[in-house]
Structure formats: C-alpha cells, structure tokens
Image: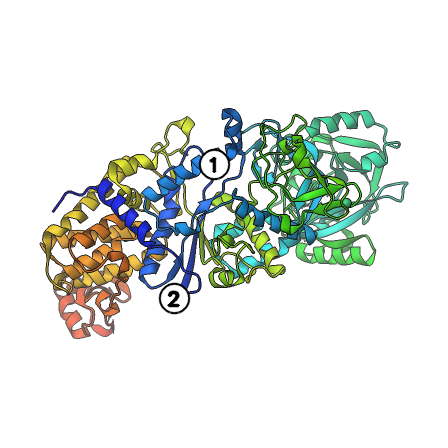
Amino acid sequence: MKDYKPEVIEKKWQDYWDEHQTYKALNDDDRGKIYLLVEFPYPSGQGLHVGHPRPYTALDIVARKRRYQGYNVLFPMGWDAFGLPTENYAIKNKIHPAIVTKQNIKHFKDQLKSIGFSFDWSREINTTDPEYYKWTQWIFLQLYKHGLAYKKESPINWCPSCKTGLANEEVIGGKCERCNTEVVRRVKSQWMLKITGYADRLIDDLDDVDYIERVKTQQKNWIGRSEGASILFPIKDSDEKLEVFTTRPDTIFGATYMVIAPEHPLLEKYKDRILNLDEINAYKEEVAKKSDFERTELAKDKTGVEIKGLKAINPISKKEIPVWISDYVLMSYGTGAIMAVPAHDTRDYDFAKKFGLDIVEVIKGGDISKEAYTDTNNGKLVNSEFLNGLEVKDAKEKMIKYLLENNLGNKKINFKLRDWVFSRQRYWGEPIPIVHCPKCGFVPVPEEQLPLLLPEVENYEPTDDGESPLANIKEFVETTCPKCGCHAHRETDTMPQWAGSSWYFLRYADPHNKDALASKDALNYWTPVDWYNGGMEHTTLHLLYSRFWHKFLYDIGVVPTKEPYVKRTSHGMILGENNEKMSKSRGNVVNPDDIVRDYGADTLRTYEMFIGDFEKPVPWMETGVRGCRRFLDRVWNLSDILVDGDKYSESLEKLIHKTIKKVSYDYENLKANTAIAALMSLLNEFVANKNITKADFRTFLMLLNPVAPHITEELWEQNNLGGYLNESSWPVYDEEKTIDNIVEMPVQFNGKLRFTIEVSKDANVDQAREIAMKNEAYAKNITDKKVIKEIFVPGKIYNIVVK
Ligand code: ANZ
Ligand code: ZN
C-alpha cells in the first residue's frame, strides 16, 4: 500500500467532483428535495479562518449523507460582497472596490474548494453582480410601492469615523460595531423600511418554525412586545394632555412625578411658560452627546432638570405633580414621556432618591422592606382607593377599564423594534432606485430600467457633509423624471450591508433567471429552506430582516410560504488556543490553509467536527489536529487487513449495525463529534479482529465519507470496492442486530438496588435467580428472611420481596 498523501489525493477528487458535477442540484426532480443552507460569507481581505469551516462541514455532512440516501440536495454557496471593509480597503489602497471584491472572492473560493465542500458551484451568487442586485432593487421598489419604504428626518447613530449612519443593531455598547468609535446622534433624512408593520407576525409565526430556543427568545426580546396602556395626564392651566406609555397602569396612584425626554416637543410648545429655559437647554446639549445605550444604563447616575412653570395633574388621584426632563426617558420609545412610580421602578426610585421626590408605595408584596423599592409583579394594591386589595393582574384590568370609561387612556401595545434605517451615505452598496422630482416628489425608477448601475467614480470617500460619494457624480445625479420628464435628481444613498442577504436564499433556487428573482416553479420546488445554520450574532439582524422581506414577498405573491426557513440551528465559536476570541491583534488566528497544507483537508474537517459539541465555543488545539490525522493514517492502513468477502465479519456484524445507527442519527443532529468517536471505536475493533471483509470496509468508508470525503473515495477506488463511493448508497442497519443480547440487570431487594447481574436479554426468572444467587450479596440480603414474591421484567429488572 502506498503512503497516505492528502496533497495528492485531495486535489484528484476535487477535480473529479468538479468535472462530473457530482454535487449539482436539479430543479424539478422526482426525488425528495432537501435545501440545506449555510450563511454565505463576506469575502474579506483576510480570507477564511478556521471558524468558517465549522458550520460548513456540519451541513456538508448532512448534504452528502442525504445524497447517498437518494435526496436531491441543494447546498449552495455565494458571496455577500457589498460593504464597508472592502470599501475602506479600496479607499486606502486606491483600488476599485469591485476589483478588491473579485480578488477576495477568488481567494475565498480557492480556500473553500481546497476543503472539499460539496457546494453546487453552478449556483454561485454574488450580491454585487448587477444581475443580482437588479432584484434587490426590484424588491426595494415593491416595498416602496406598498408604503413600506419611506424617507424620514430622524435622529440616527452617526459614526464620525466611518462617516455613516448605523442601525441600532450596529451600535455595540455605544460604539460603532466596525471601527469601535464612539457613536454620536445626528439628524439626517434617511430611507427607512417599515419592519415594525410586521412585528406581531415576526413574533407569532415563531410558533410554526423549528428554531433552537435561544434564537426564538432573542428574536422575541429584540422585537420586545409589551402590553400596557397609554394614559393622558393634563397639564395644569392648559388644554394640553401629556400622553405616557406604561406597562403598569395599576400603579398610577404611586405616580408622584412625570418625566419627559429632553427632545420632547412639549418643551418647544410651552417655552414661554418655562421659567428655567437656559438650564433646560444646557441639559439638552449635554444629552445630545450620548447614545441611547448610555442613557438607559441602569447603573448610571441619574441626572435631570425640573421644568419650572409647568405642572401635571395625576388624572386618577387628581394630585398636582412636577414634570422633569431626564435622559433616561427616550424619545424613541412609547410616547417619550412617563409617569414615574418610584416605589416600584428601579430607575424612578434612583431618580426620586437623588432629587428628593415623593415615594408612595402602592403594592404590598411579601418581601418589601421599608428601605428598598421593588419591581414587583405580584402582591396586593395599597394606597390606591378603588384598587386597594386587588392583585396586580386584576388591578391592571380594572384600571384599564376605568381609563377607557373616562376617556383618560387606552389599551396599548408597544414594541422595542424600530423601523430599519435603510440608507448609507457610502459608495459600495446597491443604489436606491428613486428619483427626486421637484414636481412629482419621489418617483421610482421604472422596473425595466433596472439594474440601476453603480457608476464608476474616482473617489469613494463620503463627502465631508456626510453625503454619499455618488452625490459628486453629475452624470449619475442629474436625470429626468420618469413621470413628467422634467429635470430631476437621483437618490444618492445606497442600501445597507443587509440588503443583499435578505433574499439570497431565493436566488439559489434559480440563479440565472433574467425575468424574475427566481421562477415560480423553482421557488415552489425548493423553498422554504429546510435547514439553515448560522451564527447567533445574526439572530436579530439578518435572520429577522430576511424573515421580514420574505413575509412581504409572500404577501405580494412572489414566494409560496410565509416563513423562509423551516429550521434554524447555530454553532459555537472556535476560539484561539488561549481560549480567547481569534483575532489578529491577539495573535491567535489559525489559518485553515496551513492545516490543509500540513495535515490535509480531511484532517481539518475531521478536527472541525471532533473539536467539541457543535453549539458550544471551543478552543483550537494543534494536538487535537494531530490526533485526527493519526486516526486517518490508521484508516488508510486498513487496506492491509482487507480480505475478500461480501458479508460482514461475524464478530463485527453487531457493532457495525450499531455504528450505522449511531452515526446516521448523530450526523442529522449535529453530533458529528460523537459519530467520529464511534467510528474510532469501530476502527479499533477492526484492527483487533486482524482482518476485515470488503463489506466491513465499504460500510466503514461510507460512514466516514461525509466527514472525510477524499480519503474514503480514494480507498474505495484503490481497493476495488465497486464503482465509485459517491455513486453508492447509505448503509442501512437491522434494528434487531443493534440490540444487545447481554444486558446488565439491576437486582433489588424490597425495591432497593443491591447489585447487578449480567443476563441474556430474554433470560427468564429462573435463569436470573440462578445467576443472582452466585453473588455473595444475595445471601446477605436474605439472611433469616423469606422470599415472598419476585417481580421480574425480562431484560429490565429483578426485584425480590423479602420479609
Ligand atoms: C409606570 C411604571 C411602574 C412602569 C412600574 C414600570 C414599572 P417595557 O416593559 O420595556 O415596555 N417607559 C415608558 N416609556 C419610556 C421611555 N420612552 N423611556 C424610558 N422608559 C419608558 O417598559 C415600559 C415601562 O418603561 C413603562 O411602564 C414606563 O415605566 C417606562 F412599577 O410606567 B412604567
Ligand atoms: Zn416629475
């Protein structure tokens, strides 16, 4: 037998698969279909790191296994290639982002190919290809035509370094997710997508999908549906009523003051009555520098200013109460005003303590001490007139009823979810296909003119006033109105990073279609995606956005199902050897190319799976890589003990059936690590057995193939096991043969476990007794007592009742 040389055989099989289009998925096919999806990468300049192959290998295993089981498998790959890192690199190095993208894609593709993933490369897509973004623009126009895209002056998170607006999701701890610069607030006219119109459905339809629980929970929390009431508080000596949103209308007798956001319009409206306007304006200026995140941090020291000259009336207790401004109330949530209940709300309590405001307890729970406030959902109402003695739940209901009857408020549901800021003042994104006409206003670019191409420019830097670089290109900006023909201007903002990925899975169904984003037939056949694996970090962004677009496309009849993905799973991160996140600055990055070069792709794949539980973060260990390589070396050497024979070896048969069962189950449940462990045990038994038949070997190679596809194909061919492995079928097991004949049976005395015996699984009570009596513990447990009854369940339990 020749030496195991991965560098030779891996290239050989990759070429073979390419040439024979082994992994091509066929539209319209009688076989059962399965659509397996992994998140397409952003082709960055750094190339792949060892984190990428983890999810790819896990689903590649499922894809390969399902093909052997007779499925028509769609397992595609593509590039999510618009975005800032490429643009920033292009600016710095003076290369066009399209060229940078092309180079990066080539590098990524070579890397992915070298690892031997069974992607259907004939369906490769690229979000920056005009043939692709034509449809991204088309979807935008449909959203616009249905009132779901609108332009709005709104305060945005502005990154002064990237010179761009950021979605809330892109601000982490008050800083820009990309460059870590402190984010500031700025008012800008932005395109927005009305995802809030789908908030209820995005929560409710989670009941119909098979997502891992933490994904569902994170999406629900992000959308943040809270049910409560809006209540009107009259402003003294005016007709004004200040509306608040509260989830606790039951606590209104404890509302001893009000707080409005510093941006609240009430201030402007009543500026003539306000006595301390200077103080208020100074405070507003301070607040403008802070992000929402900083403002609402619980631990933060409370600040604020009382509005002198305005008082509110608690509409239920009729008491006059002060109105304050403070940054802990956000303009963007609810009504931008609250009734403060310091006895039962943490922030209100801190605020009241600091400024010496009244604290009135209205809920008596089991554990309220005199000193501490409490956020309590349970307990009975006190100090609340007609609510006294009621449980919180009943008090809420009664209060809402009272508010409705007296025209003081309404039932209200609020969402944390905000509309999606869909504008970037950057170059490397899809141009927004809208024309601004002085007479007609916004006019959509006619659909037959799509794609609206990104023009060639010299300079990709945003302008200093924060406008997109496209604003400097006359030939692009100057146009005529598609409606009235008069002189008009094009929109110069581009779409955000998340646009192209919001529908890419649809394009894979029919990637070369020129007349539609995909044909009806292709969509009916392939969608929904049966299984989508991706990172937890995409739960509240990409996953939510794409569900929103899909629901919209469903509503307008473009796609056949209301949810895009049947099932969603997620992988843990691969950490550096020092247990820290891999990053250049920490110097702990492992490049998969090095592993492929030094050990082979099959070793890399095996280790990526063997490294640990799929959902958990795990540190990379070079020793683990070597262990996997040694395993494959031993697999290679199995050829040495191969003998003729088309039946399983008798001594191995049971273990083989058991292993087929276990491995088949494990692969489908993302437990390839334990599947590999089972194959390692089987290998040990093979070696101990001194020889193996072709039948033994075939099954072993087939089971290992999804993890290590090259070495197994090669061994199959070299040992003439019949045709090609990739044309063979997944082995089946015989349930009978997976059941152990010998079982360990617990022996109990009066229901207490005393010892166990080994008996055949269908031994009767007499046989069990005979074996049990040989155990010295048997006599000890009987002593002078008498056996009065025996309870015996074959294969399970032997209980002896003595007295
Ligand atoms: C009175 C009250 C009493 C409240 C109590 C809570 C506890 P969620 O659940 O997150 O929706 N609130 C309302 N609008 C706000 C804003 N713009 N900025 C900051 N806080 C705001 O929270 C709803 C609660 O958050 C509301 O109910 C309100 O305080 C506060 F024992 O009203 B509550
Ligand atoms: Zn016009």
Quadrant of ligand 1 in image: top right
> What separation in Å lies between label 2 and label 1 (alpha carbons)?
37 Å
Q: Does 222 appear above or below 327? A: below
Q: Where residue 277 appears, x then y in whole percent?
A: 82, 27
Q: Where residue 674 appears, x then y in whole percent?
A: 29, 51
What's the residue type where badge 2 is placed?
Arg
Which residue is tagged 1? 101
Which residue is tagged 2? 31
Mark 1: C-beta under 8 Å from nearest atom of ligand 2 = no
| Residue 749, picture quadrant | bottom left
Q: In the image shown, does 296 or 564 lie closer to the viewer?
A: 564
Residue 185: which numbered mark, if any? none
Mark 2 or mark 1, whichever is nearer to me: 1
The answer to whether 2 appears left or right of 413 in the picture is: left
Write the residue at 49% across / 50% down.
214
Q: In the image shown, does 722 or 644 lie closer to the viewer?
A: 722
- Protein image colouring: rainbow
Mark 2: C-beta under 8 Å from nearest atom of ligand 1 = no
> Dividing the image into 4 quarters, which one contains the C terminus?
bottom left
